[in-house]
Amino acid sequence: MIEFLTHVVLPIVQALFVPLDFLLGWVAALGPFTALIIVGAITGLAVNLFQKYGSNQELLGRRRADLARLKVLTKEAKLARDGEKKARLSGLTSQISSKYAFESMKPALYSIPPMCLLAMWVGARLSFEPVRPGDVVEVIATFEAGATGFSHVVPNDGLTPDGPAIAPIAFHRPAPTGTSNVAIAPPPTAVSSSPEARWKIRAEKEGDHLMQIRHGEDRYDLAVPVRAKGGPPPEQATVFRAESPTGDKLLSIELKLREPVPAAWWNLFMQSMGLYLVIAMLFGFGLRRVMGIQ
């Protein structure tokens, strides 16, 4: 399953990111925080546009007026203790309500796929800070259980090790979890579920650099763009395989990138994606009345 996701689904998603990079890539120059707000507002507007032009607004308006009138008539029948009329009106209300709900939900058939793709793009392009010249980034390579020995990162003029270039493949103690205000330390005996090799890499200068990690005869290349201003972050995690016949290969490489938004109540403790979703919902609901959507 992971092989299918890595080698089939992920390339398709990355290909679909290309037009989004062309249309929205300019927001990266404004910084991740501002970019998240702008793209969230665009998402809220887009959802309303789908709703307005993907449904029969005239029909929805009539059904909404019918439901309002039926509510008044049902209240009058209840006050008059006319059970038969009340039951008849309730049945009619249920029929119109179901038709109203179906018609108003039809635009979701068109909007859900592009909105999901946009959310994935936000997660990949705006959820982490870009790497700047002078930044030091922790790199974690995860191996299969049978991997032993050492792995090393190859220096170049744009990326150099901030410490030893050769790292042992071993089980490591997990990092603390929790929010930026409250850190939860793992148990004293806890270790990573798979062996890892860890480095710290320093970005020496701006440019599109290629980081190479070697393990035995294997070579693994990872693109790391470094920008003095604006620009997208590198891929936060890259999966190379789910398993190998020998059970001792590198599985994935993770970059510990900075997140631009701290976890807090106002972003539902979801950091960047939480801010994006909150802004999208605020604009989505706020624009309905302005745009006259039924």
Image: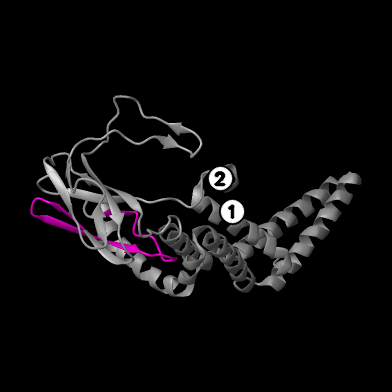
Mark 2 highlights which residue? 268
Whether residue 250 appears in this view of the structure is yes
Taking the spot 45% from the left edge, 55% from the top edge, the residue there is 127
Give the residue pinned by disc 1: 278
Q: Position of residue 95 (x, y in %)?
A: 69, 58
Q: Residue at x 43, y 59 (%)?
A: 120
Q: Is residue 248 visible?
A: no
Answer whether labels 1 and 2 touch (C-beta < 8 Å).
yes
Observer-nearest of 186 and 152: 152
- The three-letter amino acid code for the residue at tag 1 is Val
Q: Nearer the viewer, residue 240 or 126?
A: 126
Measured from the top left, where is residue 39 in percent x and y? Answer: 54, 64
Reply yes or no: does residue 231 show up in magenta. yes
Q: Secondary structure at mark 2?
A: loop
Vertical order, 243 against 18 (above or below): above
From the viewer's side, name the closer residue of 72 and 91: 72
Q: From which residue to which does the magenta span run? A: 212-239
* Residue 47 in picture, x, y percent from top left: 58, 65
Q: Residue at x 50, y 48 (%)?
A: 271
Label 2 neighbour load within 10 Å: few <14, some 14-19, many 20+: some
Left or right: where 125 falls relative to 65: left
The quarter of the rendered structure image containing the C terminus is bottom right
Residue with the most extreme top position: 188
- Helix, strand or loop at mark 1: helix
